[in-house]
Image: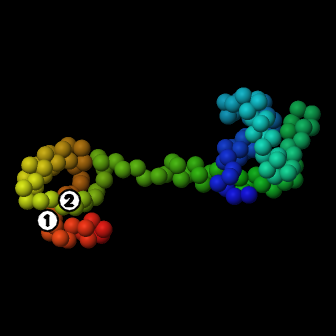
Amino acid sequence: MHIKDVDLNLFIVFDAIYSEGGVSRACRRLNLTQPAVSHALGRLRVMFNDPLFVRRRHVMTPTPLARQMIAMVRQSLNGLETTLSQTNRFDPTTTRRRFTIGLRNNLETPFLNSLLNRITDVAPLVDISTVRPERRDLERELTM
């Protein structure tokens, strides 16, 4: 089975059932209905050809396969969470970048004055430079 064929949300359900010790508590933790969590568990059971959890009194006890999987599942979920939370988003108020703009002579003055006024307000640390590429070099310049 390839990861592109798997609903990764199933692993969130798996972790919740494992942590909470039952479907009902996992439902509350995930804010999902009991049928939704049961359906996800059913899909996981088919995927791994293992019950993953067996009911013992009022607790869903993990099978040996579930115990073997949990550390890897949690590591993967934590890695995805870290990726989502630490992705650098562009913040114009704090970025220190230089942008180079290619302008034709007749556009430079009107366009650049307006742009620099706006950048001073919203991105004070940004540096703008301009170049005047020759028309015959434009395609090559854009691919760099």
Q: Give the amino acid type for the residue marked by disc 2 in the picture.
A: Ile
Would you call the spot at circle 1 few (<14 residues within 10 Å), some (14-19), or many (20 or more)?
few
Q: Quadrant of residue 13?
A: top right
Q: Give the amino acid type for the residue marked by disc 1 in the picture.
A: Arg
Label drawn at residue 101: 2
Label drawn at residue 132: 1
Q: Nearer the viewer, residue 29 or 114?
A: 114
Place of residue 134 in the rendered image (x, y in percent of width and height, measured from the top left): 14, 69
Q: Earlier in the sequence, mark 2 or mark 1?
A: 2
Rendered residue at 81%/41% (across/down): 42
Rendered residue at 76%/29% (across/down): 34
Q: Secondary structure at mark 1?
A: loop
Residue 17 can be seen, yes or no = no
Q: Nearer the viewer, residue 2 or 14?
A: 2
Rendered residue at 24%/48% (across/down): 123
Place of residue 19 in the rendered image (x, y in percent of width and height, measured from the top left): 75, 42
Quadrant for the N terminus in the image: bottom right
Would you call the spot at circle 2 few (<14 residues within 10 Å), some (14-19), or many (20 or more)?
some
